[in-house]
Image: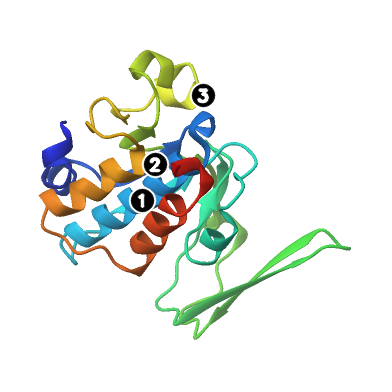
Amino acid sequence: MITDNIVSKINIEFVNIAIIANPLNGLDSLCASIALKELIKSAIPKNRNISVDIYYLDNLPFGSEILKDTSKIKNNLGEKSLEITFPTTNTSKVTYNYEQKAKVFKINLIGFEGKIPLKKDIKFKEVKETFDLIIGMGFKDIKNFEEYHKEIETAKRKEIFNIKNLNSKSLTEGIMDLFYKEKIKPNKTASLAFFTYLSSTSAK
């Protein structure tokens, strides 16, 4: 994958994508990651079910406060989840509640149709978060990226963006150039990420 055809490749090959910002680059890598996510979302066909998550595995950098309102930023890679399956004819809505004192998690199935499942029909499965592609933002090379977190080495495919392959003085400005190359107008979230970095002391 090279920087000028990332979008077309993602359209064809990838479903679940993680973008990991290198904390050593602080606000620059975070803003570039947010903008890259918006580029991918803007370019993929509406009928494609592609998930893109941003990870910043450290305390968020100074100046990023405004970004938390528009972008979900995760700080734990490789989380485990519990998958619960059981037969039902139809369910219109699912709500849930966690009772802290009792340590009880409740799920409500609104509009449930069908027979109430027996215990033997309810199946539990522990599922670990996996990715089809992990993108490193601001890492020197793939080896440097793999050494950052144990989950990265086992990913099906990994790519990196840095100022060298983006041919830019900053990561954020490099991703901004990708928008122009792909002829995609930045949306509000991407524009905010660009503004946040370019108006910061980090960009001076």
> Which image quarter is the N terminus in?
top left
Query: Which residue matches tag 3?
Result: 149
- Where 140 falls versus 119 (above or below)? above
Q: Nearer the viewer, residue 135 or 179?
A: 179
Which residue is located at x 31 percent, y 49 percent? Answer: 36
Residue kind at label 1, given as amino acid type: Val
What is the CA distance from the residue labelled 1 to the residue labelled 3? 18 Å
Q: Residues within 10 Å of mark 3 (few under 14, many from 20)?
A: few
The answer to the question of whether label 1 and label 2 lie on touching residues, with beta carbons closer than 8 A, is: yes
Residue kind at label 2, given as amino acid type: Ala
Q: Which color scheme is applied?
A: rainbow
Query: Which residue matches tag 1?
Result: 52
Which residue is located at x 49 percent, y 80 percent? Answer: 93
- Where 140 falls versus 63 (above or below)? above
Which residue is located at x 19 percent, y 67 percent? Answer: 46
Query: Which residue matches tag 2?
Result: 18
x and y percentages locating residue 122 in the rendered image: 55, 57
Residue kind at label 3, given as amino acid type: His
Q: In the displayed structure, does residue 85 sit left or right of residue 49? A: right
Point out the tag, 1 or 2, that comes first from the N-terminus: 2
x and y percentages locating residue 85 in the rendered image: 49, 58
SS state under label 3? loop
